[in-house]
Amino acid sequence: MPGSKPRNPHLQGLFGVLLGALAIGVLLWLLHLRRNGLPVDPTELELSATSPCMIQAIRQAQTGGHVITYAELDGLKRRCGS
């Protein structure tokens, strides 16, 4: 094409890398959101009960047959400092 400027391959490569990193970041964020809504399985709850605070918090959260999600478990861990 006469008259058109040649494109800088370094800028195109940088743009491709940034676009790829953004796509991976979005994918990981969506997987994290999905994980937060899933119920924690009983074995993992047992492994998380590492302190008296966590044991009590898990028991309180399970009252009335409530199923603890990963987001709730993360909150309990933050609260108890685990």
Image: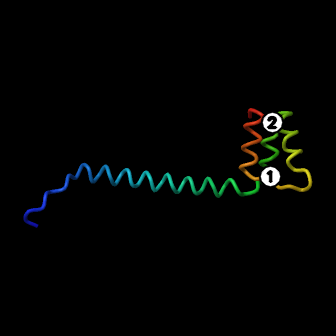
Give the Cα distance between marks 1 and 2: 16 Å
Tell me the kind of residue under disc 1.
Ile
Pointer 1 with pointer 2, Cβ within 8 A: no
Name the residue tied to disc 2. Answer: 50
Asked which quadrant contains residue 77, the reply is: top right
As drawn, the residue found furthest toward the front would be 3
Q: In which quarter of the image is the C terminus?
A: top right
Could you say where residue 37 lies in the image, as x and y percent from the top left?
A: 70, 57
Residue beneath the point at 56% across and 53% down: 29
Of marks 1 and 2, which one's residue comes earlier in the chain? 2
Q: Tell me: residue 36, above or below residue 52.
A: below
Q: Is mark 2 on a helix, strand or loop?
A: loop
In this view, the residue in front, 55 or 11, is 11
Q: What element carries label 1?
A: loop
Could you say where residue 66 lies in the image, as x and y percent from the top left?
A: 86, 55
Q: Quadrant of the N terminus?
A: bottom left
As drawn, the residue found furthest toward the left would be 2
Between marks 1 and 2 in the image, the one whose residue lies nearer the viewer: 1
Residue beneath the point at 82% across and 45% down: 46
Total marks shown come to: 2
Residue beneath the point at 75% across and 53% down: 69
As drawn, the residue found furthest toward the bottom would be 1
Any mark on residue 1, and which? none
Tell me the crowding category of disc 1: few under 14, some 14 to 19, or many 20 or more residues within 10 angstroms, Cα based. some
Q: Tell me: residue 51, above or below residue 36.
A: above
Name the residue tied to disc 1. Answer: 68
Could you say where residue 2 lies in the image, as x and y percent from the top left?
A: 7, 65
Tell me the crowding category of disc 2: few under 14, some 14 to 19, or many 20 or more residues within 10 angstroms, Cα based. few
Protein image colouring: rainbow
Tell me the kind of residue under disc 2.
Thr
Residue beneath the point at 80% across and 36% down: 50
Could you say where residue 15 lies in the image, as x and y percent from the top left?
A: 32, 52
